[in-house]
């Protein structure tokens, strides 16, 4: 499970499990107690160190409201919970300070609360790895941190020099857009021709090169055979099925996805009878590969109700 998926999966039951099993802090996981829901100076310093350290490294998660103590190997482990008394206020303060407690600010940081009773509970923070650093912790720190093992360490001069020279990287994700491609009527009734345009979005700061996209979709949805325009135009070169994938697309050395752009590649098709009350959810399994990124293998679900709403409103 990657860091973002773990962030989304953490709930009160998972936190109890971490405490029962004495789960250790590691490269991507940190526990912190909260002194004041309104964020004391020490709370702000802990936030600044976590944002700086995780962003300058490989990203990570902070669970607020859990006490950690060293085990026999000297590694801090979850040992007991101390719920945040006003967790809504605390998460509000996390959001307030996130933008100005590190310099430069870290894009993509997420905070969420886990309510246990009333307004008492835990907070969870997700910090992505950043290619726009190095990021300096402020709030009285004015230092650069990195994550090593289960701790944050002050960065040495050569570490900071290395981050200043880090090459900007793309950040790719699957992009989808529901469209209606017309409708026809016949003895069997009236049918809408639904299309889900599939592409790759680059929200990073580097150009994506040597791109590959592989897809699987569930029946009765199917990957269109005639391209984005019904005349055989695909965004990337289309290959025959390879391995577990229904189809794969690849780009040559002349195809790039620039930062902050969406690159459309193909379309998923489905005929829908007019007046259809329900529709199957669309599950898109996909793999994205490009230079300078880890291969991404995930799945995206588009609700049938969302597709019906978009098509019927056209």
Image (tube, rainbow, N blue to C red):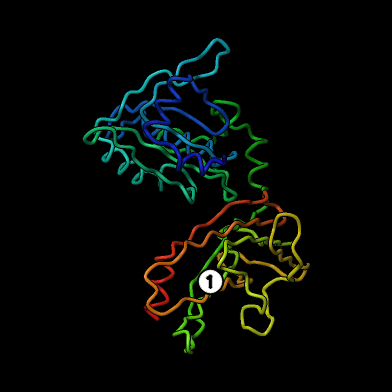
Relative height, residue 37 to residue 170 (above, below)? above
Q: Which residue is mark 1?
A: 196
Name the image quarter holding residue 305: bottom left
Q: In this view of the protein, which residue sits in the foreground, 37 or 217? A: 217
Q: Secondary structure at mark 1?
A: strand
- Say whether residue 259 is left or right of residue 253: left
Number of numbered labels in the structure image:
1
Residue occupying the point 42% across, 18% down: 79
Q: In this view of the protein, which residue sits in the foreground, 255 or 227? A: 227
Give residue 137's position: percent from left, percent from top: 47, 38
Quadrant of image for the C terminus: bottom left
Give residue 186's position: percent from left, percent from top: 48, 89
Residue occupying the point 64% across, 46% down: 164
Residue occupying the point 48% across, 29% down: 30
Give residue 154's position: percent from left, percent from top: 56, 29
Relative height, residue 88 to residue 152 (above, below)? below
Residue occupying the point 64% across, 59% down: 206
- Say whether residue 121 is left or right of residue 13: left
Relative height, residue 84 to residue 295 (above, below)? above
Name the image quarter holding residue 40: top left
Relative height, residue 16 to residue 52 (above, below)? above
- Say whether residue 10 is left or right of residue 57: left
Extreme-top residue of the structure:
72
Name the image quarter holding residue 93: top left
Extreme-front residue of the structure:
187
Quadrant of image for the N terminus: top right
Q: In this view of the protein, which residue sits in the foreground, 83 or 152? A: 83
Q: Residues within 10 Å of mark 1 (few under 14, many from 20)?
A: many
Q: In this view of the protein, which residue sits in the foreground, 138 or 63? A: 63
């Amino acid at each position: 499970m990657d860091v973002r998926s773990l962030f989304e999966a953490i709930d009160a039951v998972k936190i109890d499990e971490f405490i029962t099993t004495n789960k250790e802090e590691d490269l991507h996981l940190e526990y912190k107690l909260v002194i004041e829901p309104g964020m004391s100076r020490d709370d702000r310093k802990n936030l600044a160190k976590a944002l700086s350290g995780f962003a300058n490294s490989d990203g990570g998660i902070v669970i607020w409201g859990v006490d950690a103590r060293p085990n026999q190997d000297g590694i801090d482990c979850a040992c007991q919970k101390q719920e945040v008394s006003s967790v809504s206020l605390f998460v509000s303060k996390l959001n307030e300070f996130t933008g100005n407690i590190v310099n430069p600010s870290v894009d993509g940081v997420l905070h969420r609360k886990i309510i246990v009773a009333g307004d008492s509970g835990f907070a969870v923070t997700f910090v992505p790895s950043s290619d726009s650093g190095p990021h300096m912790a402020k709030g009285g720190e004015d230092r650069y941190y990195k994550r090593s093992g289960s701790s944050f360490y002050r960065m040495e001069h050569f570490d900071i020099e290395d981050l200043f020279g880090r090459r900007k990287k793309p950040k790719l994700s699957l992009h989808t857009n529901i469209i209606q491609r017309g409708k026809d009527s016949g003895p069997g009734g009236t049918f809408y021709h639904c299309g889900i345009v599939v592409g790759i979005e680059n929200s990073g700061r580097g150009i994506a090169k040597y791109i590959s996209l592989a897809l699987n979709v569930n029946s009765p949805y199917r990957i269109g055979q005639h391209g984005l325009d019904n005349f055989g135009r695909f965004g990337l070169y289309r290959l025959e099925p390879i391995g577990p994938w229904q189809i794969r697309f690849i780009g040559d050395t002349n195809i790039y996805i620039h930062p902050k752009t969406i690159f459309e590649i193909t379309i998923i098709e489905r005929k829908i009878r007019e007046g259809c009350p329900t529709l199957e959810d669309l599950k898109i399994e996909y793999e994205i590969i490009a230079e300078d990124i880890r291969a991404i293998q995930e799945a995206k679900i588009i609700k049938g109700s969302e597709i019906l709403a978009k098509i019927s409103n056209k």
